[in-house]
């Protein structure tokens, strides 16, 4: 039987490429730079499947890909999918939840610990030769253990953060979510709060919702003003869930104490971005799931999703909006 053609524009582990090649005729983009739009459209023309990362899937891409049946994203977030356009073109979307939860939760803790204890800033302090006896007071940070964390978006990753917070660090866990989660409340002693109440009560505010119309700029100037002046704001969701100019203002004028960010409105962060000038923000290049083991697992799951759809089977993780 003729194998379906698929286009892949990510660097994939050998085992994943082998698995794909067993079931599909694979056209892989092997250049280091992202595939240019025009080239992408050409390569997608014969493709029934597209395996990618955060590439925007919009009307013009779909028009260029008349044979496409499935876009399989190597990510759990799928805000780069134009769901309505995909439905119009009868293209389904799949994603890679669960396999990355623990890795992203580790990174959230790295941001919390790194911001509270000023890890990057004080590493630079030592390297610059500024460390001298008697400067102890200059080096103080804030405690993470037994502090209060407020998790906005108590989903799969939110729960992995709550478990670390409650059971590893003795923290009080507050959460805000679309719906209450009685099981999480029992497991982590977590308290459900409306957003404003959570912002006012938390030492660490951790953003972990998907980016949707409702969560776009969910945290802005008003919300920063509700936080404690000692609060540390962590964003590991998507940059656009936060009003970035309002965050910069809050960090500059002391409305909040510090921030730890893995995601930004524009990625990569431009070299002249104002966040780069602030000492009280820890900046990471969107590495939430970036360990070899987890990225390999995500890639294999994305491949299984894609092959399942092309074989007419239900994939392990179809994006909820496409479920019938
Ligand atoms: N920094 C990074 O590298 C990574 C970032 N992410 C981001 O984290 C997000 C969450 O991933 P999961 O935990 O797997 O998703 P999930 O779907 O399991 O959890 C999201 C939670 O947010 C809640 N939520 C949605 N809209 C809300 C609203 N308006 N107000 C309050 N709560 C709301 C949902 O009820 C759900 O419980 C992803 O969508 C992605 O954007 C995910 C992986 C890595
Ligand atoms: O999976 C996602 O949504 C990411 O942001 C990267 O792992």
Image: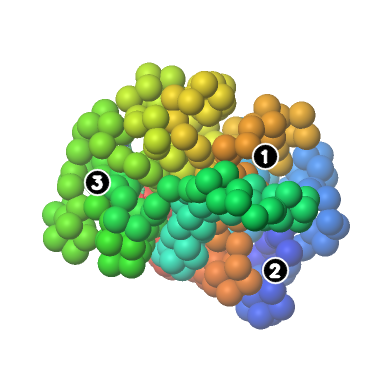
- Which of the pair 186/135 is nearer the observer? 135
- Which of the pair 222/318 is nearer the observer? 222
Contact between labelled residues 3 and 2, with CB atoms less than 8 Å apart: no
- The residue under label 3 is 174
Query: From the viewer's perspective, is 57 left or right of 309?
Result: right
Q: Position of residue 283 (x, y in %)?
A: 62, 44
- The residue under label 1 is 267
Q: Residue at x 28, y 61 (%)?
A: 170
Secondary structure found at label 1? loop
- In the rendered view, tell whether residue 162 sits above or below residue 197: below
Contact between labelled residues 2 and 1, with CB atoms less than 8 Å apart: no
Q: Residue at x 35, y 53 (%)?
A: 158
- The residue under label 2 is 12
Q: Position of residue 187 (x, y in %)?
A: 19, 64
Q: Earlier in the sequence, mark 3 or mark 1?
A: 3
Question: How far apart, in angstroms, are the residues tagged by discs 2 and 3?
Answer: 38 Å
- Say whether mark 1 is within 8 Å of ligand 2: no
């Amino acid at each position: 039987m003729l194998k379906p053609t698929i286009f892949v524009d990510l660097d994939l582990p050998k085992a994943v490429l082998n698995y794909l090649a067993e079931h599909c005729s694979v056209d892989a983009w092997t250049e280091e730079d992202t595939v240019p739009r025009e080239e992408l459209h050409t390569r997608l023309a014969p493709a029934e499947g597209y395996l990618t990362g955060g590439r925007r899937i919009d009307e013009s891409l779909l028009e260029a890909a008349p044979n496409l049946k499935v876009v399989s994203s190597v990510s759990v977030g799928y805000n780069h999918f134009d769901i309505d356009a995909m439905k119009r073109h009868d293209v389904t979307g799949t994603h890679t939840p669960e396999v990355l939860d623990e890795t992203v939760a580790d990174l959230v803790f790295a941001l919390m610990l790194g911001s509270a204890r000023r890890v990057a800033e004080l590493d630079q302090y030592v390297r610059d030769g500024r460390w001298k006896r008697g400067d102890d007071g200059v080096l103080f940070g804030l405690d993470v253990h037994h502090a209060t964390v407020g998790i906005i978006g108590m989903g799969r990753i939110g729960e992995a953060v709550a478990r670390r917070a409650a059971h590893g660090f003795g923290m009080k866990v507050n959460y805000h979510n679309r719906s209450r989660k009685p099981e999480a409340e029992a497991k982590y002693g977590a308290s459900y709060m409306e957003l404003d109440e959570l912002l006012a009560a938390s030492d660490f505010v951790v953003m972990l919702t998907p980016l949707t119309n409702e969560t776009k700029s969910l945290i802005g100037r008003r919300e920063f003003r509700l936080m404690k002046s000692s609060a540390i704001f962590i964003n590991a969701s998507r940059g656009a869930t936060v009003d970035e100019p309002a965050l910069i203002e809050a960090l500059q004028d002391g409305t909040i104490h510090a921030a730890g960010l893995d995601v930004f409105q524009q990625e990569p962060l431009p070299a002249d971005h104002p966040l780069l000038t602030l000492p009280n923000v820890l900046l990471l290049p969107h590495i939430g799931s970036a360990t070899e083991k987890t990225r390999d697992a995500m890639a294999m799951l994305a491949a299984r999703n894609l092959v399942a759809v092309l074989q007419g089977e239900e994939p392990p993780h179809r994006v909820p909006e496409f479920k019938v």
